[in-house]
Amino acid sequence: MMQEIRAGSGDRRVVVLGYFVLPTQALFEGCPASWCIATDVYNKDGRFARAPGRGGVDTTGTSIADIQLRVGSFEVAALVLVGYSAGCQAVRELLRAGAEPEAVLALDGTSGSLPPTVAQLFPWQDAAERARQGKQILVLTHTQQTYTEHRGQDSFLSTLEGVRLITGWEPGKPLGDVPLMRRDGDLVVASYASAQIDPEAHRRQQTVALPDLLRRIVVPWVEARAGHGAVETSPLPSTSRYGSPRPLLQLGSRGSEVSAWQAALSSAGWLLTVDGLFGPATRIATKLLQQQSGLAADGIVGPATREALKALHGDGEPPTALHALSEAEKDRIFGRIEWELAEPPQGQIRIVSGSDLVWVHLPQIAGLLGAPRDESVLMHRLAGPRLMELFEAWGKTGVLARVIAWSGSFAPRLVRGGTALSSHARGIAFDLNAQWLPRGEPMPPLGVMGSLAELVPIAEERGWVNGGAWAMPDPMHFELARVIG
Ligand SMILES: [Zn+2]
């Protein structure tokens, strides 16, 4: 329930949802009088972190419905999400739940656990990508506070490090009160000066940075879009609560049309969750399909894209046997890695650029030989969620008992004995039971110590290929061979 609401005016209104730690008037003062603004204040029971996104609650939809109940009906011209400090968790959960705002302003609060989970980073990384493409504006601010990473038991990710992981940029260190700004497309990072532990600098994000960035960046951007009709074609997340249903499917779309599209992609081998919510995974699968078909990869499903799926895969034909992706396909899907040979030991490389890694928490590997103590492993951003899903599936079917050792995921190296880049260097592969499954020998049959034979079909269903049947067998090795939902 939003606490403070200003109705705004007009048949079409920009809606701003603000999430704060302390009540503030800065948002009301910084936005045009015609905009509709609603704010909520984080309370210590973590309402922001819990309410949206978990248990399938569409808080953007319910927030806007709530506002319209209280101020009367209007058409939503654009959605703006603003978070400060812990309030940014509410913004993140809204993004995770499929909201597609026109503008996001996150003030010194992209925090996560240490290390962060995929679920904490992915919504921001996805928003950053959209912003780089000019589809929304994302403004991230940070102070130089890093003490949150050194608080012992209570340690969590500082916003500074969060911005690094989300953007891949090294945040700037300004000296005075004027932020250093960095921009790529409509992704903007504003870096503010502070000491390492500096509550006052953190508070000034709400009282000084908020109105300043609204006035200089967010309001002009949204007004320009809303004024030129771009907002009508750039969707709001819900088709039912407000706005009108759209014929095209895209990020944020919902409903039975989306379910049908996900089912068609799934039967063509993309293995998406059919949940009627067009989220980042559905968009990635759609873009890859478009790339394969020579269409503009915009992730929007129109007639040409539907035809492309039929042409490539027929109507619901089962996928062909899974095989590892070619190097060119890996480059295209996961990004090109620039690397150079490191010093001996032989085969080690130094990655110069192109790495896109996230920490993935795998509770299922606790206690395995070789498992990291915090059960967190590095994987490519696109592979991380798939790895978590795979281990969950293995866990549910009871085959995890066959896994004795965790033998590594990301590793900066070449293929053993070769000159090609290992898929481990891309972060899309992991090894299990290495001590029992030497390279060059096929997967031993079920029941033999170390055999993973029961795990392979479940992995293949989820797009992970095992190396046990390769010409040069590598039975310990699993790698992502399809990008799936
Ligand atoms: Zn391997």
Image (spheres, grey):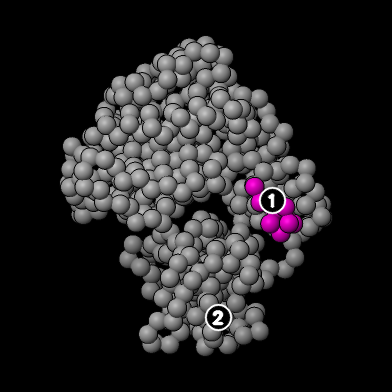
Q: Residue at x 48, y 24 (%)?
A: 15
Would you say residue 270 sits in the magenta stretch?
A: no
Q: Classify 391 as above or below 103.
A: below
> Start and end of the magenta stretch?
289-298
Q: Secondary structure at mark 2?
A: loop
Quadrant of res 443: bottom right
Which residue is under mark 2? 420
Number of labels in the image equals 2
Could you say where residue 485 lies in the image, as x and y percent from the top left? 60, 52
Q: Residue at x 33, y 28 (%)?
A: 211
Q: Amino acid at mark 1?
A: Ala
- How many residues crowd around disc 1 within 10 Å: few (fewer than 14), some, or many (20 or more)? few
Quadrant of res 322: bottom right
Q: Classify 324 as above or below 417.
A: above
Could you say where residue 129 lies in the image, as x and y percent from the top left? 51, 49
Which residue is under mark 1? 296
Type of secondary structure dominating the magenta stretch = loop
Q: Is residue 119 visible?
A: no
Callout 1–callout 2 Cβ contact below 8 Å: no
Which numbered tag is attached to residue 419? none
Quadrant assignment for the N terminus: top left
Q: Residue at x 66, y 84 (%)?
A: 471
Q: Nearer the viewer, residue 62 or 459?
A: 62
- How many residues crowd around disc 2 within 10 Å: few (fewer than 14), some, or many (20 or more)? few
Q: Amino acid at mark 2?
A: Ala
Q: Classify 290 as above or below 202.
A: below
CB of mark 1 near ligand 1 (< 8 Å): no
